[in-house]
Image (spheres, rainbow, N blue to C red):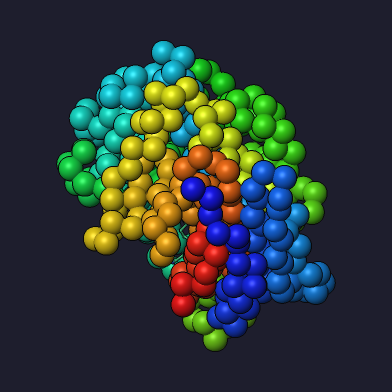
């Protein structure tokens, strides 16, 4: 069944609301076959007063988790990794519970504590303390395993960056190759994602990009320019840089079966509800959202200092949308930006 046309006016209204709530700028790009729709609002750089445009690159945060999942599941398809094996079979140093499997990591059911809870408890001091730091995977895993598991492995969904740091460590341990090489060879190059990169631990963005602005916990204080950082606290859990066109191409290719064999795509899109209303779900490195019109879209969200991202596509990959607001530590903006999904896929503003 064909979807109603995107409501571009509603997308623009969502952007205006996000700006009224503190975002310097916002962009949304929708792609459907040869057609693309562009909405850009506000500023990409508040010092230079550079207007936002939909071609600009940005830090995608946890949307990186879906890229990591594609690499991992390609290794599963190649017979290198067994989804239901203990993660400890593939890690250089063991996690504290042998029952944690690779699948638990991909579905946030391992119970591993998320070290960013402590790292960013105080938003700006926490960020300033790590923005130029380079961590090893093991240092991040050690921060997590210093705390008890949130739940017994497999017993519950508990989202944790630690899971995708462990998966990055597994990829590098079993292949002897950095994740950056796998992202490039397996995804960026074949899909011609010319505006997508993994440059950890470099702190700068290349090409044309949106600057990111972190709101302080004391919201009366000015925004902090958080554009330059290593994102070493996240790496395979959050350090990819991309733009809206590339994210749309990535998620369309993924859901239309161009990146994974059928068996692995089926595993990835086997969704488990994670909200009481069942409208939000998680599969393997993939979020599902059932929208106001009943359409379910698949993708991921991202929160990294100065950048909120939504990147989703339809179950057949025919229509994709990527939205960015260049601020963070502002839950109101993050929730508001999510309404671009309904405007883009349901053709209505849910308000
Ligand atoms: C589950 C999430 C929301 S959090 C997770 C990951 N991002 C982080 O873990 C960063 C957390 C701190 C970010 C910071 N917040 C604070 O410092 C608050 N004290 C800010 O807003 O810039 C990502 O991305 N995921 C999002 C996701 O998957 O959507």
Residue 124 percent across, percent down from the top left: 53, 68
- The residue at 80%/74% (across/down) is 49
Say left or right for 41 vs 11.
right
Q: Is residue 226 visible?
A: no
- The residue at 70%/58% (across/down) is 37
- The residue at 80%/49% (across/down) is 207
- The residue at 42%/51% (across/down) is 296
Outermost residue on the front side: it is 1
Q: Is residue 8 above or below residue 244?
A: below
Residue 338 percent across, percent down from the top left: 49, 65
Residue 130 percent across, percent down from the top left: 54, 54
Q: Which quadrant of the structure image shows residue 7?
A: bottom right
Outermost residue on the bottom side: it is 220
**How many dots with numbers?**
0
Q: Is residue 40 visible?
A: yes
Say left or right for 135 vs 191.
left
Q: Is residue 166 above or below residue 182?
A: below
Nearest the viewer among 25 and 1 is 1
């Amino acid at each position: 069944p064909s979807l109603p046309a995107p409501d571009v006016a509603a997308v623009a209204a969502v952007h205006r609301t996000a700006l009224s709530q503190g975002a310097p700028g916002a962009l949304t790009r929708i792609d459907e076959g040869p057609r693309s729709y562009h909405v850009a609002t506000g500023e990409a750089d508040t010092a230079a007063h550079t207007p936002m445009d939909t071609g600009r690159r940005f830090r995608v945060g946890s949307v990186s988790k879906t890229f990591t999942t594609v690499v991992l599941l390609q290794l599963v398809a190649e017979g290198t990794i067994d989804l239901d094996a203990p993660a400890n079979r593939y890690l250089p140093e063991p996690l504290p519970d042998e029952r944690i499997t690779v699948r638990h990591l991909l579905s946030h059911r391992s119970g591993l504590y998320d070290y960013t809870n402590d790292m960013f408890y105080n938003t700006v001091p926490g960020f300033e303390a790590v923005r130029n730091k380079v961590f090893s995977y093991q240092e991040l895993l050690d921060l997590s395993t210093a705390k008890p598991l949130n739940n017994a492995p497999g017993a519950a969904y508990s989202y944790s960056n630690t899971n995708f740091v462990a998966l990055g460590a597994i990829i590098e341990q079993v292949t002897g190759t950095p994740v950056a090489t796998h992202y490039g060879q397996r995804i960026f190059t074949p899909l011609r994602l010319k505006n997508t990169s993994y440059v950890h631990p470099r702190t700068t963005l290349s090409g044309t990009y949106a600057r990111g602005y972190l709101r302080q916990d004391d919201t009366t204080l000015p925004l902090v320019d958080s554009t330059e950082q290593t994102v070493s606290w996240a790496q395979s859990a959050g350090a990819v840089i991309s733009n809206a066109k590339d994210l749309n191409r990535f998620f369309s290719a993924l859901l239309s079966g161009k990146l994974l064999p059928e068996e692995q795509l089926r595993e990835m899109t086997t969704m488990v509800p994670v909200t009481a209303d069942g409208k939000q779900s998680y599969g393997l490195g993939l979020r599902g959202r059932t929208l106001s019109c009943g359409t379910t879209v698949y993708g991921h969200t991202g929160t990294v200092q100065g950048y909120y991202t939504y990147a989703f596509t339809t179950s057949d990959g025919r229509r994709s949308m990527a939205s960015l607001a260049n601020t963070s530590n502002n839950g109101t903006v993050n929730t508001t930006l999510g309404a671009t999904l309904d405007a883009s896929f349901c053709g209505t503003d849910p308000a």
